[in-house]
Each structure stands twice: as structure tokens, then as C-alpha cells.
Image (cartoon, rainbow, N blue to C red):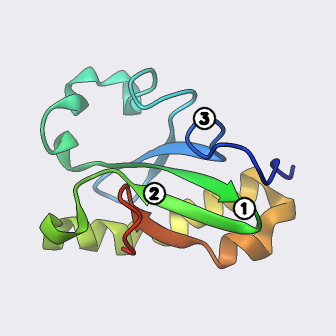
Amino acid sequence: MEKDPHHHPHMAPLMIFWVAPDGRVFEAEGSHHKSPPNGDRGIFCPGHKGHWRGRAAQISNAIYVVDYCKPADTRSKSQLDLLAKAKDNLLNCLKLKYPDLQGEIDRAVFVDEYGRFV
């Protein structure tokens, strides 16, 4: 399913997600607040109980995976480790959901919410 190349990435993401500290990916249908992992509303505390939250969006022919955890200049080693651990799981989830976007997903760009590369 190809998205409209002119859609707004925040309003029409490919996927909104949470990633657990062990690297498992949880799709947050609709929004992070409506779908916390395992229904755990306590995840909204500072630090998100070690989880990473973000969204993937397609802009033209590029896929961007946006990290909402913290600005890049304050990201901790544990957050960087989680990002590295979860990257393949996250890309595989996107490929299962959007099989016709495999090439674009393989070239996905990871950025923070300010557009800085992660």
C-alpha cells in the first residue's frame, strides 16, 4: 500500500510504535496514548520505563523513522543500545505491514523529532 507522497507524516504515519527494552516492537494503533504496550499507562512516566516511542512515515519515496525519546544531544548509551537492538525488528515489522515498500524500508532514515540524524 503506497501512501500519498504529499500526505502529512504526523497525521498519516505508516506506523506508530513502542519498542520494549528487550527490542520487541509494539504497534500503537492510533496513538501512543491510546495504545501503550500491554495497556500499561504507567509507561508515560519520565523515561517511559525504558521503552522507545516513535513513528515511521513516508515522505515522497523516503521512509523516516522518528525517535521521540529525547533530543539527540541528551540520548543515553542505553537508549542508543536499544535503538541498535530494535532497528531490525522495527524494519521487519514495517516490511510485514507494507511489503510493496521493501526497498524504501531498507533505506529508512532514522531521525529525532527535530529532524537530526540518529
Rendering coords of residue 108 (x, y %): 60, 72
Amino acid residing under circle 1: Lys
Residue at the disc numbered 2: 66
Q: Earlier in the sequence, mark 3 or mark 1?
A: 3
Give the mark toward the camera: 3 or 2: 3
Could you tell me which residue is drawn at 57 percent across and 53 percent down? Answer: 56
Mark 1: secondary structure: helix
Check the image and name the residue furthest to the front: 6
69 or 48: which is nearer to us? 69
Rendering coords of residue 87 (x, y %): 47, 69
Residue at the disc numbered 1: 95
Amino acid residing under circle 3: Met
Could you tell me which residue is drawn at 62 percent across and 53 percent down? Answer: 57
Could you tell me which residue is drawn at 22 percent across and 55 percent down? Answer: 70
How busy is the neighbourhood of tag 2: few (under 14 within 10 Å), some, or many (20 plus)? Answer: many
Give the mark toward the camera: 3 or 1: 3
Count of number-bearing discs: 3
Instruction: Judge from the rendering whether residue 21 lies leftward or rightward of residue 14; answer left or right.
Output: left
> Quadrant of the rendered structure where residue 12 is?
top right
How busy is the neighbourhood of tag 1: few (under 14 within 10 Å), some, or many (20 plus)? Answer: some
> Quadrant of the rendered structure where residue 27 is?
top right
Mark 2: secondary structure: strand
Q: Do callouts 3 and 1 mark residues in contact (Cβ within 8 Å)?
A: no
Q: Earlier in the sequence, mark 3 or mark 2?
A: 3
Residue at the disc numbered 3: 11
Mark 3: secondary structure: loop
Up/down of 68 relative to 114, above or below: above
Which quadrant is the C terminus positioned in?
bottom left
User: Label 1 to label 2, Cα distance in Å?
Assistant: 17 Å
Rendering coords of residue 52 (x, y %): 32, 51
